Image (cartoon, helix red, strand yellow):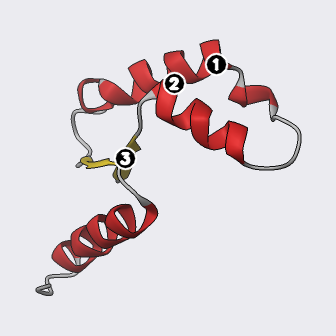
Amino acid sequence: TLVLDVDAKVAAARRDRRSGSPELYEVSEMQVELARFYAKIDELFPNDTMVHIDANQGVDEVAAAVWAEVLKLRGEST
């Protein structure tokens, strides 16, 4: 499982920049709780393999990190 870790403040700034109305789960307090949950997800699901990716980076960097992990999981090199 790939987990995209993003700081609640970074996520809020990204939501503020886009158009559209907020979704129910996009309330700041909920985002903080979700960030806490995903930060400890490895402990909650010890039998699953979790790979954390720093999603505070730009889109291109996050996409490259995700793709690199996918290639690793497929046994391919980058």
Mark number displayed over residue 34: 2
Residue assigned mark 1: 28
Which of pointers 3 and 2 lies earlier in the amino acid sequence?
3
Label 3 SS: strand
The quarter of the picture where the C terminus appears is bottom left
The kind of residue tagged 2 is Leu
- Is 35 drawn above or below residue 23 in the view shown? above
- Residue 25 shown left or right of residue 67 in the figure: right
- Residue at 32 percent of width and 27 percent of height: 39
Write the residue at 40% across / 58% down. Answer: 58
Mark 1 residue type: Ser
| Label 2 residue SS | helix
Task: Give left or right: position of 73 versus 33.
Answer: left
Residue drawn where x is 71% and y is 21% of the image: 27
How dense is the environment of label 2, judged by Cα within 10 Å: few (below 14), some, or many (20 and up)? some
User: Is there CB contact under 8 Å for labels 3 and 2?
Assistant: no
Q: Could you say where residue 71 lies in the image, as x and y percent from the top left?
A: 23, 80
Above or below: residue 61 compared with residue 44: below
* Residue 12 in the image, given as x and y percentages of width and height: 60, 31
Instruction: Pick out the residue farthest to the top.
Output: 29
Question: Tags 1 and 2 in contact by the CB under 8 Å rule?
Answer: no
According to the image, label 3 marks what residue?
3
- SS at circle 1: helix
| Mark 1 / mark 2, whichever is N-terminal | 1
